[in-house]
Every structure is written in structure tokens, then in C-alpha cells.
Image (cartoon, rainbow, N blue to C red):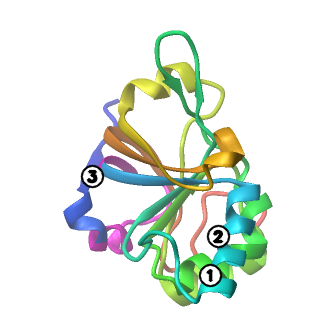
Amino acid sequence: MTTKYTKISQNSLEELKNLKAGEWVLYSGELTTIRDSSQTMLIEYYNKEGKLPFQINNKIIIYAAPTDDIDNTVIGPTTSKRMDDHLDFLLDMGVAATIGKGDRTKAAISLIQKYKTPYMVLMSGVSAYLSSFFSERKILAFEELGPEAIHLFTASDLPLLMAIDSKGESIFSNY
């Protein structure tokens, strides 16, 4: 059995809204990493400055904290549910989609439906392998947080599974 993938690029993000839970995606384009600390700092920055230190409108957020080994950057997803308290902020700022690991809270699913902003999952436990799909890393904000700083990556044919589609349909059986 061959898995069918829909190719999505930075220029075709709107197509993500048409995909259904359970469909596979090969994504090529920019990804912005966010983790617990950087997400909190981003909101604090916005509340103080009235703007963000970089643009997230029509961008994909991946919940991850890259680290470096001897040869390259290692990156893998983190648990998305921990980020759900601040999902409304990200989606209100125009984020096109989120990527992470695991299911989301009922409140997050409601926000995904409201904003029509899908959630995809990335394989976990294989960070060294996943690193081969990422290139062109740079720090966008909060360098002092180390791996939890906000990074910009370019991905090439990154395999993703549509976990919760823009209508709120989910691959997770508990909803």
C-alpha cells in the first residue's frame, strides 16, 4: 500500500484548510519553532510593545526546541497540549497551522474550528532522522532561552499527518 501525500509549500498554505484529518502532507517552506518559555515571552513582548518581534501571520508554528549535536541540528516535536493555553493568541495573530506531537484539548479544537487553522503531527522519537528535512536555521527572538529560543527553519518535503482539520475533525479517538 502506497501512502498518498499532498504537497504543500509556503505559497500554498491555504490548501491546508481543504485537507481532512488522516491525510498526509509533504511540506516544504518556512517553519517557526515555539516552546513553553518562548511562547510566554512572545506574548509578554506583544503586550509591552504592541507588536511582535517578527511576523507570524500566514506562517506555520512547530512546537519544538532544536538542539545541536556534533554534526547537525536535531529537531523533533514536543507535546502540543502544553501550548494550548496560548493557542488563541497565535491563531489571532494569523498563524496558518500548527505542528506538534499528540492530541489537543477540547478548547484548542474549538479554536482550530473557529480560526480554520489545522493542526498536524510529526513523528516523535526520531529527532535525528527528522533533522534531515530541515535546513537554513536562524534565531528570530529570545536567543537567551537557548534551545527554546524562537527559530526559523526551512523544511523540505517534511512528512506530516493532518491530525485535526480546519473543521475540527480529529484522528484522536477521545474527541
Calculate the distance from the C-alpha at mark 2 to the C-alpha at mark 3.
32 Å
Q: Position of residue 140 (x, y in %)?
A: 48, 55
Calculate the distance from the C-alpha at mark 1 to the C-alpha at mark 3.
35 Å
Q: Is residue 22 magenta?
A: yes
What is the quadrant of the N terminus in the image? top left
Q: Position of residue 88 (x, y in %)?
A: 65, 82
Please name whichever residue, 121 or 75, is drawn nearer the observer in this view of the structure: 75
The kind of secondary structure element at disc 2 is helix
In the depicted structure, whether residue 39 falls above or below residue 27: below
The residue identified by callout 1 is 46
The kind of secondary structure element at disc 1 is helix
**Residue positioned 24% across, 56% down in the render:** 9
Q: Position of residue 138 (x, y in %)?
A: 42, 43
Name the N-terminal-most of marks 2 and 3.
Answer: 3
| Magenta residues, start to end | 14-28
Number of numbered discs on residues:
3
Q: Is residue 18 visible?
A: yes
**Residue positioned 76% across, 57% down in the render:** 37
In the depicted structure, whether residue 147 falls above or below residue 31: above
What is the quadrant of the C terminus in the image? bottom right
- Decide: marks 1, 2 in contact (CB < 8 A)? yes
Say what amino acid the circle numbered 2 marks: Leu
Say what amino acid the circle numbered 1 marks: Tyr
**Residue positioned 58% across, 76% down in the render:** 90
When asked about the image quadrant of residue 123, the answer is top right
Q: Nearer the viewer, mark 1 or mark 3?
A: 1
Residue 101 located left or right of residue 165: right
Specify the label residue 42 is tagged with.
2
The residue identified by callout 3 is 6
Say what amino acid the circle numbered 3 marks: Thr
The kind of secondary structure element at disc 3 is strand
